[in-house]
Structures are given as structure tokens and as C-alpha cells.
Amino acid sequence: MPRRSPSVLDLRFQNPRLARVGVEVLSLEQLRSRAKPSLFEAPQRVDFHHLLLIQEGRAEHMVDFVTYGLRPGAVLLVRPGQVQQWKLPAEVQGQLALISSEALSPSVARTDVDMHLLALAQWPAFSQPSRALFRAAVDDIGRLAADVERFEGTDVEAAIIRHELLTLLMRLARELRSVIPHREATRDAEIYALFQKELEATYAKRLSVLDYARRLGFSESTLSRACVATVGRTAKAEVDGRVVLEAKRLLVHSQYTAVQIAHQLGFTEPTNFLKFFKRGAGCTPLEFRQAHTIAGRPANAQNKRKRLAR
């Protein structure tokens, strides 16, 4: 795998006391007092969900090269594998839930139907729900924080925390489904979820939509229809978009050249990669790398791993 910039931190959910439930809740004030300044100075690749509710102040937050303006009432969701960068002034206040992937597994006291109803993979990174919903979400996360703080490892406590987390997320999902395509537990949603899992594992193999359809046991038209019905994009757009995103990450967070990245992503001819990237990103790989160099410094050197939850 390519080496990432020394300014890129790998964040993992590591809290032995809360490992069983996989959830921790911090106020932004607690986060600032606990974390070193370097945590807010560099991009981070996370392996767990961040759910951020902004209560006071204004800030900016970058997720996979898109900068979101945060203000009171904003909700931000960062998913595992995404690269984020904080810009967090001291006056900004809010609540941050750290949620491991295991905590959201259907096998952990949840049904597949619950996971389809949540459809976290399709949530927008940024949303501004109604005031009533935001207040309810703040109340939910407050109860969750209190029970997480008191958690002593019993089965009953673990069940309470899991149900409170699901209540918080489901309440937000209910309103989000009114502004994004409807994603009940339909056959199309199930097919799309299977496709996304396969795509995440094989995007560097340059498979066609037909290849994915055959791997999953569906016709190409069934797979394409499921993608359009679930997210409003074709299966080919999903495949191309995932490859472009990984190319962007490698350009900014590794030392690899465009030619090396082309081979890493399954392109046999670098010129084809250049055309593909320009069509998807609107600029050349070199232009993108130069535009996203951190503080004017080229990306280089080794990984660093930091703990956010202790």
C-alpha cells in the first residue's frame, strides 16, 4: 500500500472500557481538552463513524476534499475510510458520537431491517435538520452520553446503550429520507448494499458493471436499476466515482506518482488513467495534487497513528 503523508493520522476506535458497545460520546470541549493540537492540524483517515451535532459557533470541516460550513443545528456524519480535516475554533460547541463499525453490525442486537432503514452509507455528510429534530437529537445524544459514562459492562447497560444509539440514528434517518431517495428495506436497497460491499473490496480491479452483476448473481439491468432507485446514480457512475475518490486520496496522501497510482487502480495505460481522472475530477492529477497540498508542503513520509478515544 502507498505511504501516506506524516500529516495524515490513522484514527481507530480504541477504548477498552467501551469496546463491548463500541460507542463513546464527547462534547467538543472534552475533545479539545483531551486531544493534542496536532489532531486538528492534519487530515485523518478514520475507521469508525463520527456523528457531530453543532450547538454553538461556526466552523468548517473537510470530508474527502469537500469543505462543509458548520453552524448551529448542523449534523455531520463521517464514515469509516473517509478522510476528514477539522477546523474547530474554540467557540464552537457541540456533541460528537464515536461509533465503531461493529456497533452498527446487524449481528449486534439489530435486525437487517433496522440497518436498511438507517442506510448510513447513503446519508449526506452534511445536513441541517429541522429545529425540532435537532433538539430531539441533542436530547438523545445526551441520554446516550450519560449511560455510556456510567457503563460498567453489564448486559442490561449494553442493551440500553445500543437501543439509545439506534433511536438517535433512526430519528435522524426518518427526516433524511424525506430529502434523499426513499430507502426502505426494499429489494433494490438490498442489491445496492451488496454491490457497495463488493465495490469497496474490488474497485482497484477495474471491473465492469457486467462483472459486478455476474459476481452478485444479478443481471446488469437489475443492478443498474437498483442503483438508480436507491441513490439516483447509475452503477457505472458509482464504480467510476469510487475509483476517482481513491485516486484523489492517493494523490494527496501518498508519494506515488500519477503513473504509479494508475497501476495501483488497475489501469494498464497511464494515458487512460489521465483521461479518466480528468473526466471525473475536472482537472489533471497534477493539478489536483497541487491544489490540495497541505499548507504548501508535498505529501511524504510515514504513517502516524493516533488515538482519539482513550
Image (cartoon, grey):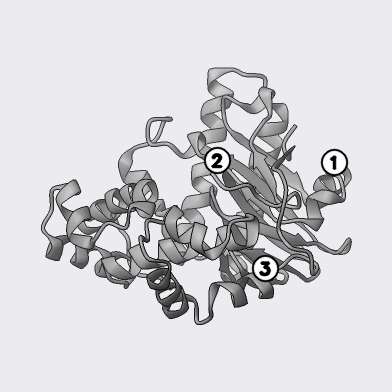
Left or right of residue 73: residue 221: left
Question: Which residue shows up at 74% across the image and 44% down it?
Answer: 26
The image quadrant of residue 18 is top right
Left or right of residue 164: residue 201: left
Residue 200 percent location from the top left of the image? 39, 50
Name the element at disc 3: loop
Per the image, the residue denoted by label 2 is: 164
Q: Residues within 10 Å of mark 2 (few under 14, many from 20)?
A: some
Name the element at disc 2: helix
Name the element at disc 1: helix
The answer to whether mark 3 and mark 1 are in CB contact below 8 A is: no
Which tag, 2 or 3, sits closer to the chain's start?
3
The image quadrant of residue 85 is bottom right
Q: Is 84 located above or below residue 97 in the figure?
A: below
In this figure, what is the number of numbered marks?
3
**Closest to the observer: 301 or 85?**
301
**Closest to the observer: 225 or 244?**
244
Tell me the amino acid under the disc marked 1. Arg
Question: Which residue shows up at 80% across the image and 67% down it?
Answer: 295
Tell me the amino acid under the disc marked 2. Glu
Residue 84 percent location from the top left of the image? 65, 58
The image quadrant of residue 130 is bottom right
Question: Which residue shows up at 22% across the image and 58% down it?
Answer: 188
- How far apart, in angstroms, are the residues tagged by discs 1 and 2? 25 Å
Per the image, the residue denoted by label 3 is: 73
Residue 24 percent location from the top left of the image? 67, 38
Q: Nearer the viewer, mark 3 or mark 1?
A: 1
Q: Residues within 10 Å of mark 1 (few under 14, many from 20)?
A: few
Tell me the amino acid under the disc marked 3. Gly
Per the image, the residue denoted by label 1 is: 34
